[in-house]
Image: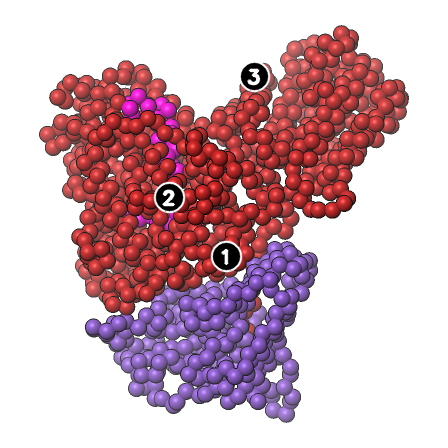
Chain colours: A red, B purple
Amino acid sequence: MSSMVSGPDLLNAYRLSQTGGYDELLDGDGAPRRHWLPFLKELNALPEADRAARALRLDRRVRETGIAYDVFADPTLGSQQWQLDLVPIVFSSAEWRWLEAALIQRAELFDAVLNDLYGDQHLLRDGHLPPELVFSDSAYLRACQGVLPHSGGLRFYAADLARGADGQWRIIDSHAETLAGAGFALANRMVHTHVAGDLFNASNAVRLAPYFQDVQAALTQHSGRDNARIALLTPGAHHEDYFSHAYIARYLGYLLVEGADLRTRGGQVFLKTLEGLKEIDLIVRCVDGRASDPLELDPSGYDGPSGLVRTCRRSPGLVVNAIGSALVQNRALGPYLPKLAKHLLGEDLALHDAPRWWLGCEKSRRHVAERFDQLVIRKAQEGTGRPGQAALGQDTRSMSDAERDLLKREIALHGARLVAEEKIGFSKAPVYANGSLAPQPFAVRMFVARTQAGYVAMPGGLAMTIDPDRAVALSAPDGHTRDVWVLSDAEQAHHVSLWRPALETARVQRAQRVIQSRVADDLFWLGRYTERADWTMRVLRSALRRVAEDSGPEAGTVAARKCLQVLLTDDDSTAADRARIAGLDYDGLCAKLVRGGGATRTLERTMQRLYKVAHLARDRLSLEAFQTLSRFRPGDTWAASLASARPGGVLDLLDEGLASISAFNGLMHENMTRNFGWSILDMGRRLERAYNLSEAMMALFIPAPDAEEEQNSLMLLLELADSFITYRSRYRLDPMLPLVLDLLLLDDTNPRSLCYQLAAFSRQLETLPEGKQGVSLTEDRRVILALLTSIRLADIERIASEPSRATLQKLLGEQLLLLPELSDAVARHYFNLTDDALHRAHLRSESAS
Amino acid sequence: MMLDVSHRTYYQYSSPVVQSQHLIHLTPRSTERQAIRHHSLIIEPAPATRFDSVDAFGNHMAILDIELPHKEFVLHARTTVETIAPPAFDFAKTTPWDKLDGVLAPAGKPIPLDVVQYRCVSRLTTASLGIAEYAAQSFTRGRPVLQGAMDLTLRIYDEFTFDSTATDVSTPIHEVFRHRRGVCQDFAHFALACCRAMRVPARYVSGYILTRPPPGQPRLQGADASHAWISVWSPQTGWIDLDPTNGIAVSDEHVMVACGRDYEDVSPISGLLLGGGDHDVNVGVDVVPV
């Protein structure tokens, strides 16, 4: 049988590199286990070139999807890498059924433990669990005493499992705080299916979508309303799990919110939106329990809204998992679980934790002291939601005598917060590397959720390669991950995706129509930065072409120079800055606009900011739209090559960059729902374009250049404003000042004219809720009206014939002055960011008596 | 002793506070040693909602939502309380500190969790190895628990200097230990870290103390401040209050407002503000015998 499905190439090398211990792929006789056969057969049937190509596509797709790239992290750090192997971990349906039952039992047990510890505490009072184990745990939140038992308990649970060298599965860590990286598992599956869906289908593996549908239905039911407004609470884009939060929120159709977006009042929690406060029906909590209410919990934790615990006292079901649930993550519970299972469930514990001792117990400390060298000392509570990020623990073998002595004293003093753990080893499963399969130790995270039918386990998970010499937990510094497949006995149902849910559409879209003030701010700047990037690249392209095409000495470079210069200065530039820029030669100016330290509008900085806001607003963007911007990720090849390229190379790169921006704009234009978010994005774009155009005109025509230079300037302006063709087809003349000014200032049918930008901005502004009531116009509406009126009333004949250009100067000067004011006014009116940070006032007791 | 306590806190903000939420512990609890005869709390501006409850440690707490823009915020708590000195007890007759395990995990009987919870360290009372060594000098082998605790109280009183400029509300105890300086709150946290390093049940108490003006001088109004001390448990006495700042066992001149693991559990006023700019705070406490 094995020879039929496995070519000599794939399995022979694998057998050679086997080093003993349990192997997932091969049985004791070296034959492939039955449940791997369908996959092996398909994989073997592929030409090696195809396998290698798929591995590369996985890599690329992971990067395009943005898995695990922390937006503010240094992308060159190794720890940020995320790799997805072509080979999944395959579970037989029988083994899966056993594991699922065991995980469900564990979830039920932890649910019962939580209800007791946050309720009557019989377990502590009657000696089933040492009270000091619980009271020393900073995850035990007294403010939630009496609240959690009414909350619906543990709704999400995740376990990190490892199969020891002895073939036994054990839980090495538990996660009860948040979704614990379920988004990574989902994203891995999406990426993998995209590249190797044929292998998946041939294996008859179980899909994930029905699980998430059940989760969605259960949360809707829990919220108590069919058209519930459900929010996923994340610490924000700086958090290492942000990708997972954004991905899952998007997939389930929930709002992605941060603590500062919310406000509590009595028993309710509200979302601050463009239209004012909107009540939230349910919060899926992806922030640490301790950090979710600065008023009653950790005073330095601002990841949730102030007053959330008080709100939960009134509405206990409001937050899932209930605040305080992280208590069952305590590793020290492990040795007590078998008795707790008997006591609380009347059952034997099916799946044990890795062998462990709680060091708060005198007897355990003595036992541990005797075999100190064989054990690893770890914190009892660590709380890492992110797969692969657990701490390694202190291995006593590698310690000096002094370190060992210190550790022993630490244990004597703070043993209640420490555990000792035995290394159980890790079984191995194949990874695809260099054209063959190699056995690698792994651990796997599995997920459980409470649905209307009770707890169910996600038929999949996230496996990671482990360094067995160092790790006792799911710690994977190289981020090498694998999808997890569960084989089915039954025929798989047709593909169900939640991306475009059919029946629930109405509900999901209603929720998405709400725009948080913070997200509106991000979208506004996304509009501004895409336009700024576009404009800056156009200026650079035009400038470089003028020297590359060699169309006569100096032709047009004087005009281009003015446009480059003006982009390198702003209101904050000092006289010295300006002099330095004026002193640069043409190439120096171009290079500086690409990446000049100090200047605020260099291409490099604009791209960084563009990528950052796109990341912040990514749950509002389609995946495709986000992917078009992935080229601009700081440190990625495009940005790196741009920095080092020679002038000719830069032109090619600029063409690529401009194509990406227009692809992004096109996708947004075609795909984005015309809601407030769209209006805000478009307003940002219009405002930026109006500003850039006004600024360039000011630079080019004031003071008035001579006749030849005026021609060059007009040509350049038409080029930058992408209106050359329009001009030519309309006038069939060389550029003339009155005609060009008319086309670019006044013509409201030209989508590149100033008037068009202002009119479009005004129209979009009208679609936004008025917010503040009153007879007089709001500030933003007043400013746009002034700008628009001033342009519409302009007398082009007079402006163009005036030798002093005073009227044009006044007109453009007004735009340059009021457009930034308009931006601020919109921000004040809609984004409400001034003074929006909560801060804490404290007093202390000082009596000396 | 019958005491009138006035505790007035006055915040001034440089720009308006648009909205604020406060968690307050300003209403003293009744205990065996103190009976609350009268209590009033004036809050200005009046909160839009006020939620009163008893926290997990048995203290009165309230959560206030203030939704009117304001530049001043006043809380004035007034209490008339009758205090009773604890009966005299020989600390040498209490159970040795290293024999408490047996008392606190009695075979076949429920474990007294309200005592056991105070053996465990909290965020502000986590001892370093150095602090544990300091503590061990007071809790020598077989020493009665309250005798050890009183010895610790006196050592802190003798060796530490009261200095309100040396620390602020966020100074960690190892700094207090290193410089041997601080205020009552720091000394209480340090004493708690020492007790808990030895697994002696001890809790943080916030409240007020009757102060006496220097001989021949009148009492200055509002000159006092809120105070903090510790409470240590023995099976013979229950909770006994010790004041490291003054080097005494508490008699009837202290008024307890709230107790918990540390300051964070019982902070008199904490709040989260939207807006407000810089703030300036004035606290006036008067404790006057009636």
Q: Quadrant of residue A613?
A: top right
Above or below A38: residue A826 = below
Residue A77 x, y percent position in the rendering: 43, 36
In the picture provided, is A612 more to the left or to the right than A397?
A: right
Q: Quadrant of residue A41?
A: top left
**Residue B166 visible to an observer of this rendering:** no
* Pointer 1 and pointer 3 on the same chain: yes
What is the secondary structure assignment of the residue under circle 1?
Answer: loop
Q: Earlier in the sequence, mark 2 or mark 3?
A: 2
Mark 1 touches mark 3? (CB < 8 Å): no
> Residue drawn at (27%, 56%), measured in percent from left and top?
A333
Please give the count of numbered marks on the rendered protein. Answer: 3
User: Looking at the rendering, in which quadrant would you find the N terminus of chain A?
Assistant: top left
Mark 2 touches mark 1? (CB < 8 Å): no
Residue B155 tag number: none
* Residue of label 3: A652
> Residue drawn at (36%, 70%), measured in percent from left and top?
B118
What is the secondary structure assignment of the residue under circle 3?
Answer: helix
Task: Tell me if mark 2 has few (under 14), some (14-19) or many (20+) residues whose alpha carbon lies within 10 angstroms of its own.
Answer: some
Nearer the observer, disc 2 or disc 3?
A: 2
Above or below A648: residue A344 = below
The Cα atoms of the two marked residues, 1 and 3, are separated by 58 Å
> Residue drawn at (31%, 80%), measured in percent from left and top?
B235
* Residue of label 1: A267
Q: Quadrant of residue A798?
A: top right
Residue A74 x, y percent position in the rendering: 48, 37
The amino acid marked with disc number 3 is Asp
Q: Which residue ends up furthest to the left in the rendered image?
A: A29
